Amino acid sequence: MIEVSGLTKHYGTKVGVEDLSFTAGRGEILGLLGPNGAGKTTTIRLITGYMPPTRGWARVAGFDVEDHPAEVKRRIGYLPENPPLYRDMTVRSYLEFVAQIKEVPPARRRAQVDEALGALDLGPVAGRLIQNISRGYRQRVGLAQALLNRPEVLILDEPTAGLDPKQIIEIRRLIKSLGGRHTVVLSSHILPEVAQVCGRVVIINRGRLVAEDTPERLSQRLRRSQRLLVRVKGREDQVRACLEGLEGVLLVEEEGPAPGAAPDPEVSAFSLEAQPGFDLREPLFFALARAGLPILELRPVQLSLEEVFLQLTTEEPAEATAEGGEGA
Amino acid sequence: MKRPGRFRPLALARVGYVYRREMSAYFLSPVAYVVIAVYLVLSGYFFSMILLATHSAEMRGTLGDMSLVFLFVAPVLTMRLLADERRTGTDELLFTSPLSTADIVAGKYLASLSVFLVMLALTGVYPIILMRYGQPDMGTVLSGYLGVFLLGAVFLAVGLFASSLTDNQVVAGMIGFGMLLLLWVLGWAGQSLENWLGRALAALSVLDRFSDFNKGVLDLSNAVFYLSYIAGFCFLTVFFLDRRRWAR
């Protein structure tokens, strides 16, 4: 339903996104995960046709976004990060306006506006000015707007931002129920949210795709034990034999000399990966000591994926208590 | 590499959606009422003062002053139109809908033009008063009104263009006002500069042609002149709106 290939966007010399490629199948809920400023919104704006890519292309339902913008835009429902609401309109008249510009046939407009009002429980505020309703309701009006034309593709940029926990749960449930009928792309910087709602996750960091997998497999990879880098005074074959003999070692990879240092045949470096939950450091020390190979350096190596996850798993927003009431 | 934003033709129905939304924005807020009221007070003042001073049944002086007042009013009417969409993020709704940029610009322009037409129609009481007590030359009055309308339409196009340059209403208003004032004084250079530059600037002047209309001289070339100004600035607006998003 959505194909993205080599998608690149530069803002002057600044990189927005670089060489992104991924797909989302019909009825799939795809999570776009990344820390703030990673390029999620840029990616979304390229798919929705708000702006064109510097290189690469995006297709929605087989239509190239740049060549057939109108075809693509008719098939998309889009909730930007800040819901695009006209504060001087009532909820109903706003949705009617959106129905018009999204080319919902006149005969069906009223029914589809009512349907969207119903789906998001907006009945009680339908006649009120948008500037007078609470933040939670506004977010829902934004979602109603995105759903209004019964789009094949639904693109939601941080749909739960600024909501209280109860509203967050409701919105997530709603999004989950939309999968199957709609293809959904959901961007978020909250890992548990994506894990709950999405069938597949694309992780972006600094504009680049870092990983793409199901949430389950990603968390498996996350739980894997740390990598270690060890630099040993000794010839490569000697050290390798010693390391590979260790219990619990999964992987031994040779590394180059330390940055700035000249290659030295008497010093070798390896990175090691252990079985999950297995601490290699002690057995490593004793094994190398027995073999008479002094350790010059031993340190953990962060996987880039883990780095991203560390930034991502910065728990859910704790702004929960501030805005309890709906203010209806 | 693909071509940058190409022009999608406008469609009347889509222009109408934007137009109606803008009209309701004008008339649901105090903006339109305040602007119309201020305009009527000022033009009414000019009308009565000129009438008291000259005792002649003609509109030339009043219409000239009305067009000057509108120079101040036009940026106020247009400054919100595009700048505010950008500030509130609603431009993202418009630009990701099947509307083309030309639809959006045309709808907004026509809405501001309609408010202006309402203002002009309300000043219609002045010639009616003249007709009650004298014999004004209605041909000249109508031709003068046509001139005010065309000149005002140019002002609105310039104001709309200014609004596309920024997300700040005040900045948009100020830029629009500055451009209009410059446009207003262009013709003066023609009087003081005798060389090609003076002639070129005078040719661009929007004021000289207005006095033709106000004298009762209907010249098609003058109307075409104003229409080209309008089309030019609307085109620039579309161009800048697209260019900002389509910059690579």
Image: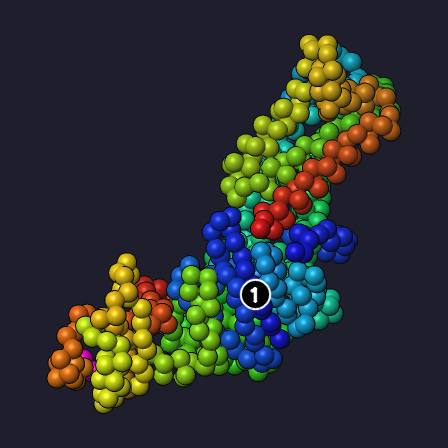
Q: Position of residue B115 (x, y in %)?
A: 68, 40
Chain of the residue under the numbered disc 1 shown in the image:
A
- In terms of depth relative to the viewer, which is nearer, A242 or A183? A242
Instruction: Name the residue located 60 percent from the left edge and 62 percent from the top edge.
Output: A56
- In terms of depth relative to the viewer, which is nearer, B130 or A208? A208
Q: Position of residue B25 (x, y in %)?
A: 60, 48
Quadrant placement of the C terminus of chain A: bottom left
Q: Position of residue B223 (x, y in %)?
A: 82, 30
Q: Which of the 4 quarters of the picture holds residue B66?
A: top right
Q: Residues within 10 Å of mark 1 (few under 14, many from 20)?
A: some
Q: Position of residue A3 (x, y in %)?
A: 60, 72
A86 above or below A59?
Answer: above
Magenta segment: does it hold A186? no
For the record, the magenta segment spans A277-281
Q: Which of the 4 quarters of the picture holds residue A1?
A: bottom right
Amino acid bearing label 1: Gly
Q: Which residue is mark 1?
A: A6
- How many numbered circles are shown? 1
Label 1 residue SS: strand
Instruction: Name the residue located 47 percent from the left edge and 51 percent from the top edge.
Output: A14
Instruction: Name the residue located 87 percent from the left edge and 25 percent from the top edge.
Output: B219
- Direction from residue A134 to residue A52 in the image, left or right: right
B231 above or below A226?
Answer: above
- Give the overall secondary structure of the magenta segment: loop
- Direction from residue A63 to residue A126 in the image, left or right: left
Residue A142 visible at all: no
Residue A186 visible at all: yes
